[in-house]
Image (cartoon, coloured by chain):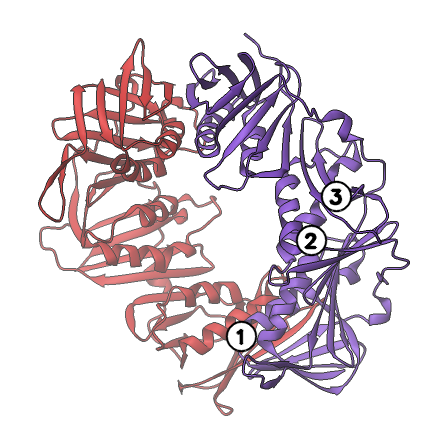
Chain colours: A red, B purple
């Protein structure tokens, strides 16, 4: 292989694929980037075997003024697996508009800028694992912004504990024209449900590793309004702009959360999102010290406000008051993790609007609904209130 | 104690004193901030017993338009030691222009903003350790910018290894009208020497912990052109703007480095600082892998350039060429830590100027001089070159 490339353009692509490179791996070839010349230009692949990110650099691009700019000159086609971390750092630090890459001997790679020479030891592309998708079962398109919102509103509820592997992912369940995306660690639950009509699409129920989706969130390009999603029996592929992002699916049955989410409430309380957020933010200051991060919450319809209390035995205590905008039902006292509460409120877009609590008693799971976005549901399981 | 304070003004001061709070300590009162009302306003002190930062908040300040703005209203003078971390976080997160602080019962502290109440458990000021300076031996003033430069150009050479405690600090040696500030870990040395005539000042030789000076660098206010320095037998005090920064001095004799620093050179080589820096930056990419971070340097007067090489057996190799601007003496090949080289070049202000190497053989310490700033000397001990 012998090629010349535009350095800046290459850096842009390496920014994507290097995200998939494993921090450490037993399969040493995966520390490399699969670098392959094609008819269209150069194809780049990085993978840690869970996540695979693929992108390509075209031979030419058109500027705003419709002028063609050459990005790649292929003198001699070929492919090589290049040590990813070093390759990226060298390319970033090189002083050159155009860099030259060619392979020689057995997989050695020579990189040349305006000055200085870099030799890296590569590996043959043939040895790189095959990660292409086979027999796609489901194929559909989501607005890229919606996909990003799904991730942001649920990912923090994914279980850290691996004892139930399925809970370490976000469940995507499609049926009856709705797509429900759920994350839960069994102490709290976050769900985004969107109406979504696609006759061609059959029902599915897959769980995507949380780590994959958080990486996807960083890689995905909002400039491309649509993301094409393909699902096989054990893989999912997100295609967006000129980047394709592939992840394995989690095995194991995801719990039927619908049964777990209350739909009617004895007590409903509406408060300002902003007021509640800043109050919880302060209450969690001390709750933090306490292992359970517990905040005591008292709904007081007579006084027309909510009182939140937390205290760390050694340090002191905090008391916050939040005005009630509207309430149905009686008074209530309960306790929950103030950090779960804070996470849930962070997942509600700041719009100066209001949120509504739905309670069914002091030990029943309660929900927080975004009055500006019905798709967004946050549920928290209370903790026992020690008086 | 019962007072009202301007929140923003208090935050500004807490930003300083909290820098001195210990991460963990056996002396629990040091996790607190000494908060004391005075005739002039409020005095604040934070300390980890090595470093003590003191500042004060005045009752009033004048705006640009010479209007007096009240910052503090003292209803009831007094003092208390407040849990530092929590106090600062509460004050930062409170929504209020003016906050109220008063003490009650035995050292409980009530903090009130516009809404919400915070109770912190304090400790009596009497219990706070006395850290005031006694019998000052040396007293002088340095330009604040110069003090900051001294720290930046030397601190990275301070020894991490504690086996020789004196080397974990920066040595300030005054005599014959010059102040020499030196840091060395015995593998490299950084020194800044400034002419400094002060008849009233007697010779001194003190070593200040590196950690103290790096904190000082962050605290010191460049808006105040002068910093007043006072030295006792075991403490040093830096007074700048309305912040005073005190540190203990290191015990033990600092080595006589003068004997160690060559003043004449068999070989002198001048190169562009910018070119050398970016070349070393790239060379160190791979040198890093190798435990010793070794870069091989060949000075080639005939070819009129320097060649720098590094290689990491498993990954590959780098070769960089830097043009020689001027040279006296023969050719030379030697090796040194590329990271030491990089640190030394970072300590030279980027001015588009040149640096000069001074060598006396491949195994003798060599120096790097900033041609734009004679005060700045960087010395590195070569490593044996394995062929």
Tell me where residue B384 sits by quadrant.
Answer: top right
Q: Which one is nearer the viewer's eye here, B175 or B385?
A: B175
Q: Which one is nearer the viewer's eye here, B312 or A382?
A: B312
Q: Residue at x 29, y 70 (%)?
A: A373
Q: Which one is nearer the viewer's eye here, A26 or B38?
A: B38
Q: Residue at x 53, y 67 (%)?
A: A338
Q: Is residue A253 visible?
A: no
Cα gap from disc 3 to disc 1, whole angstroms: 66 Å
Question: Dot 3: few (<14), some (14–19), or many (≥20) neighbours within 10 Å?
Answer: some
Q: Secondary structure at mark 2?
A: loop
Say if mark 1 contacts mark 2, CB within 8 Å: no
Chain letter of mark 1 equals A
Q: Give the number of the disc on residue B93.
A: none
Mark sitting earlier along the chain (3/2) = 2
Chain letter of mark 2 equals B
From the image, state whether disc 3 or disc 1 is nearer to you.
3
* Left or right of A318, for residue B318: left
Q: Residue at x 10, y 42 (%)?
A: A67
The residue under label 1 is: A334
Image quadrant holding the C terminus of chain A, namely bottom right
The residue under label 3 is: B179
Chain letter of mark 3 equals B
Give residue B272's position: percent from left, percent from top. 46, 31
Question: Dot 1: few (<14), some (14–19), or many (≥20) neighbours within 10 Å?
Answer: many
Say if mark 3 contacts mark 2, CB within 8 Å: no
* Left or right of B185, for residue B249: right
Q: How many marks?
A: 3
């Amino acid at each position: 292989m012998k090629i010349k490339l535009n350095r800046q353009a290459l850096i842009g692509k390496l920014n994507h694929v290097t995200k998939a490179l494993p921090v450490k791996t037993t399969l040493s070839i995966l520390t490399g980037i699969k670098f392959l010349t094609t008819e269209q230009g150069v194809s780049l692949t990085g993978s840690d075997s869970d996540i695979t990110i693929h992108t390509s650099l075209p031979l030419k691009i058109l500027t705003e003024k419709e002028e063609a700019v050459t990005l790649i000159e292929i003198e001699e086609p070929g492919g090589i697996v290049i040590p990813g971390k070093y390759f990226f750092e060298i390319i970033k630090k090189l002083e050159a508009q155009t860099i030259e890459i060619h392979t020689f001997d057995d997989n050695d790679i020579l990189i040349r800028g305006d000055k200085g020479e870099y030799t890296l030891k590569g590996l043959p592309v043939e040895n790189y694992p095959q990660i292409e998708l086979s027999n796609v079962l489901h194929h559909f398109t989501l607005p890229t912004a919606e996909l990003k919102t799904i991730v942001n509103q649920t990912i923090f509820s994914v279980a850290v504990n691996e004892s139930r592997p399925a809970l370490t992912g976000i469940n995507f369940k499609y049926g009856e024209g709705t797509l429900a995306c759920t994350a839960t660690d069994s102490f709290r639950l976050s769900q985004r449900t969107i109406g979504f009509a696609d006759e061609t699409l059959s029902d599915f129920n897959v769980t995507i590793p949380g780590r994959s989706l958080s990486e996807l969130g960083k890689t995905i390009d909002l400039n491309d309004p649509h993301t094409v999603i393909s699902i096989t029996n054990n893989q999912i592929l997100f295609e967006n702009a000129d980047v394709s992002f592939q992840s394995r699916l989690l095995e194991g049955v995801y719990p039927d959360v619908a049964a777990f989410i209350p739909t009617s409430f004895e007590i409903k309380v509406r408060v300002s999102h902003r007021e509640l957020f800043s109050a919880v933010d302060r209450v969690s200051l001390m709750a933090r010290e306490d292992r359970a991060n517990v905040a005591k919450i008292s709904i007081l319809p007579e006084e027309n406000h909510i009182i939140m209390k937390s205290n760390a035995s050694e340090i002191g205590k905090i008391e916050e008051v939040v005005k009630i905008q509207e309430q149905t039902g009686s008074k209530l006292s309960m306790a929950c993790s103030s950090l779960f509460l804070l996470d849930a409120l962070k997942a509600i877009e700041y719009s100066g609007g209001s949120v509504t609590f739905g309670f069914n008693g002091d030990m029943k799971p309660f929900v927080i609904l975004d009055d500006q976005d019905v798709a967004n549901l946050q549920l928290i399981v209370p903790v026992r209130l020690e008086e």
